[in-house]
Amino acid sequence: MYGLVLEGGGAKGSYQIGAYEAIFQCGLEVNAISGTSIGAINGAMIAQGDFPLCKSLWEDISYSKIIVASDEDIREFDT
């Protein structure tokens, strides 16, 4: 029996999805999931069987989908 614990921390959520995919591909069966913040959101989607949707959300994420600013506005802060 394996449990999955997912921590909070914004961008860590992207890593979690990649790590979960690797666990799944290895054939390990996760019987329980616990998470905080973004980990709870990812964990809920995984537990509901929505992993493909969750993965696609992370693959298509951008600043403008999270905050009210264009991607161009955000790039100005990087310089």
Image (tube, rainbow, N blue to C red):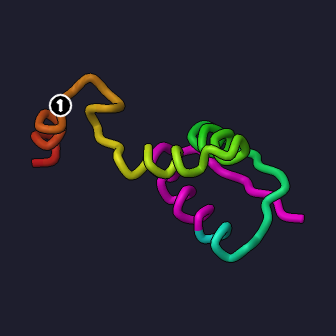
Q: Is residue 46 left or right of residue 54?
A: right
Magenta span of residues: 1-21
Image quarter hosting the N terminus? bottom right
Residue 39 in the image: above or below residue 16: above
Farthest residue, direction top: 68
Residue sitting nearer the eye, 39 or 55: 55
Q: Residue furthest right?
A: 1
| Above or below, comparing residue 74 to residue 31 in the picture | above
Q: Circle 1 — which element?
A: loop
Q: What residue is rendered at 79% in x and 60% in y?
A: 30
Q: Residue 23: horizontal and vertical position, in percent?
A: 66, 69
Kind of residue at disc 1: Ser
Q: Residue 15, how many percent across, how many down?
A: 50, 59
Q: Which residue is mark 1?
A: 70
x and y, in percent, of residue 7 in the image: 63, 49
Q: Residues within 10 Å of mark 1 (few under 14, many from 20)?
A: few
Residue at figure coordinates x 76%, y 46% from the top left: 34
Q: Residue at x 73, y 53 (%)?
A: 5
Task: Reply yes or no: does residue 5 show up in magenta.
Answer: yes
For image coordinates 34% across by 46% down, the residue present is 60
